Image (cartoon, rainbow, N blue to C red):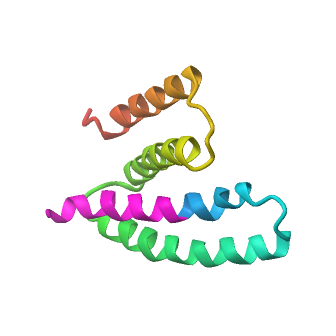
């Protein structure tokens, strides 16, 4: 795999961990808040183990702004699947429009002017 793709793969893995750390507990509302915080923090550790190298490697090829927009699009993609498949929440038309606008933002960020 070309090194330029490492940030995409690492950010995707990072965002899977992040999404579970931030939102996975929503299915367990009866769990003690302190326990949820500790478990979320433990999951977030693994997020950082992928996120930090993703940005370090990615900065060889992309600007910080490009990495941030890439991360946000990956986050929205991962979260979309998570909310539909794990939380069983529906995908609404306005979510899709918002996602399209984020992709449009990426076009402007990555475009060489």
Position of residue 63 in the picture relative to residue 15 (left or right): left
Q: What's drawn in magenta, residue-wise? A: 1-17
| Count of all numbered marks drawn on residues in the image | 0
Q: Is residue 89 covered in magenta?
A: no
Q: Which residue occupies 75% across, 60% down? A: 28
Classify residue 29 by image quadrant.
Answer: bottom right
6 to 84, vertically: above or below: below
Position of residue 19 in the picture relative to residue 62 (left or right): right
Q: Which residue occupies 50% across, 43% down? A: 76
Q: Which residue occupies 75% across, 72% down? A: 37
Assign the N terminus to one quadrant of the image: bottom left
- Name the one closer to the observer, 53 or 75: 75
- Does any portion of residue 5 appear in the rendered image? yes
Give the prevailing secondary structure in the magenta stretch: helix
47 to 100, vertically: above or below: below
Classify residue 58 by image quadrant.
Answer: bottom left
- Does any portion of residue 59 appear in the rendered image? no
Q: Position of residue 51 (x, y in %)?
A: 44, 68
Q: Position of residue 30 (x, y in %)?
A: 84, 62
Position of residue 82 in the picture relative to residue 13 (left or right): right
Q: Is residue 10 covered in magenta?
A: yes
- Name the one closer to the observer, 46 or 26: 26
Q: Position of residue 12 (x, y in %)?
A: 39, 58
43 to 97, vertically: above or below: below
Position of residue 71 in the picture relative to residue 110 (left or right): right
Q: Position of residue 33 (x, y in %)?
A: 84, 69
Assign the C terminus to one quadrant of the image: top left
């Amino acid at each position: 795999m070309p090194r330029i793709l490492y940030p995409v793969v690492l950010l995707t893995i990072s965002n899977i961990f992040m999404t579970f750390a931030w939102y996975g507990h929503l299915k367990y509302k009866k769990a003690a808040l302190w326990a949820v915080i500790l478990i979320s923090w433990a999951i977030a550790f693994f997020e950082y183990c992928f996120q930090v190298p993703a940005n370090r490697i990615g900065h060889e090829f992309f600007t910080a702004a490009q990495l941030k927009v890439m991360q946000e699009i990956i986050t929205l993609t991962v979260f979309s699947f998570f909310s539909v498949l794990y939380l069983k929440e529906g995908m609404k038309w306005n979510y899709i429009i918002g996602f399209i606008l984020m992709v449009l933002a990426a076009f402007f960020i990555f475009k060489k002017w």
